[in-house]
């Protein structure tokens, strides 16, 4: 089915409504301190207390094995060969992010995701689960009631479901047991790392810092700035706070067009321009309609039967092609307006952009994801 051309505006509205000028931003929003980073944690555990929506233990042997191991650690020894038929237990994976400078005793949020064939984790309780880092060391312990943001019901072969039922979160569900050391710089220097490589932005950050602290900052490359900081920890923290609060005007990003070939989404920044080019647009559509035709036997037929057959109608339509001239230096608004004027849908836009890039008219990097 052909989508309405105005859908192009829904995809690109956030770009078109952005201001033409670049606003000043804090260094804190453009860069981070080297060494100050998050760490990912993972664990395997069990969720109990489900209302008959847990794993089918005959199809998930790891759930049964986990239950037997847990019961053994709690002093309950099950007879060998015991066939457990449980419906209120689910095997889950727990993931969490350990923020920088987290100390033992602090709490962090965790995400609980089913790894078996459980129907829902709603109403379940996660049992105590160690969370490990990439070095296989335990950094947190998770436990608590799982909050699932969905709902579902089934009866008489019919079911309804809202949102996802096999994953949930526990706010403050893990307690940090071990801290990860994070050094604020090396020796007398700290390093600012930009979120995206940009030589112009790096030079402006160096200039802004040196205007307040002459001779302290120097550029290492297109993404890193070296800053001389006080050796005292307290003074260094205050110094970093002042550096992060400085504002600069970041450089304009390189022209880029992002195309998602799976969803048909297209996003362009305001730096995208076109050289003088012409675009022709036309569609060839095939329409197939099928309608039932009832055939009945004759008036005096002895063994006649009524037969329902299908009759198909095939129609080919060719829309008129439109030729649109795009002037040189057209900005993003003119590009979208022109493509919409010739009736281009999002799928058409994918092909048009690729053709413009191949022809050398699109002054932007075309990235297909």
Image (tube, grey):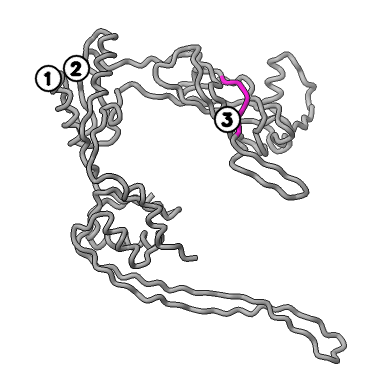
| Quarter holding residue 218 | top left
Closer to us: 142 or 206: 206
Left or right, 184 with respect to 175, comes to left
Q: Residue furthest right?
A: 302
- SS for dot 3: strand
Write the start and end of the magenta stretch as one range: 142-148
- The answer to whether 307 is drawn above or below residue 166 in the figure is below
Query: CB atoms at circles 2 and 3 under 8 Å apart?
Result: no
| Pointer 2 or 1: first along the chain | 1
> SS of the residue at dot 2?
strand
Q: Which residue is mark 1?
A: 215
Q: Are marks 2 and 1 in contact (CB under 8 Å)?
A: yes
Q: Residue at x 69, y 35 (%)?
A: 55
Q: Residue at x 13, y 23 (%)?
A: 211
- Name the N-terminal-most of marks 3 and 1: 3
Q: Nearer the viewer, residue 23 or 261?
A: 23
- Return the residue at label 3: 112
Report the residue at 62% width, 43% height from top.
162
Question: In the rendered structure, does residue 146 fall within the stretch colored magenta?
Answer: yes
Give the crowd class for mark 2: few <14, some 14-19, many >=20 residues within 10 Å: some
Number of numbered labels in the structure image: 3
Residue 273 appears left or right of 60: left
Q: Where residue 216 sits in the image (x, y, percent)?
A: 15, 19
Q: Which residue is mark 2?
A: 228
């Amino acid at each position: 089915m052909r989508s309405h051309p105005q859908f192009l505006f829904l995809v690109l509205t956030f770009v078109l409504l952005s201001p033409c000028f670049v606003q000043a931003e804090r260094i804190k929003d453009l860069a981070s301190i080297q060494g100050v980073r998050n760490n990912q944690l993972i664990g395997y555990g069990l969720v109990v207390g489900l209302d008959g929506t847990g794993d089918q233990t005959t199809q998930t042997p790891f759930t049964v094995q986990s239950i037997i191991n847990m019961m053994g650690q709690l002093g309950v020894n099950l007879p060998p060969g015991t066939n457990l038929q449980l419906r209120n237990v689910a095997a889950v994976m727990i993931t969490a992010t350990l923020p920088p400078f987290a100390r033992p005793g602090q709490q962090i949020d965790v995400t609980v995701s089913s790894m078996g064939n459980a129907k829902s984790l709603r109403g379940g309780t996660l049992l105590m689960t160690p969370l490990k880092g990439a070095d296989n060391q335990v950094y947190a312990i998770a436990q608590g009631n799982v909050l699932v943001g969905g709902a579902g019901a089934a009866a008489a072969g019919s079911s309804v479901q809202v949102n996802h039922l096999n994953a949930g979160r526990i706010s403050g569900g893990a307690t940090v047991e071990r801290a990860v050391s994070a050094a604020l710089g090396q020796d007398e220097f700290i390093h600012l790392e930009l979120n995206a490589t940009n030589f112009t932005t790096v030079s402006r950050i160096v200039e802004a810092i040196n205007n307040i602290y002459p001779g302290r900052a120097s550029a290492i490359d297109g993404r890193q700035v070296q800053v001389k900081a006080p050796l005292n920890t307290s003074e260094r923290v205050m110094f970093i706070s002042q550096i992060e609060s400085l504002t600069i005007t970041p450089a304009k990003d390189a022209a880029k067009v992002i195309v998602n070939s799976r969803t048909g989404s297209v996003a362009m920044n305001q730096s995208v321009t076109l050289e003088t080019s012409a675009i022709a647009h036309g569609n060839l559509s095939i329409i197939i309609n099928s309608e039932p035709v009832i055939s009945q036997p004759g008036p005096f037929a002895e063994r006649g039967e009524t037969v329902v057959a299908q009759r198909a109608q095939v129609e080919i339509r060719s829309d008129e092609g439109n030729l649109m001239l795009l002037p040189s230096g057209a900005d993003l608004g003119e590009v979208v307006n022109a493509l919409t004027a010739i009736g281009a849908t999002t799928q058409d836009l994918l092909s048009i952009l690729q053709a413009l890039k191949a022809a050398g008219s699109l002054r932007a990097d075309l990235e297909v994801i």
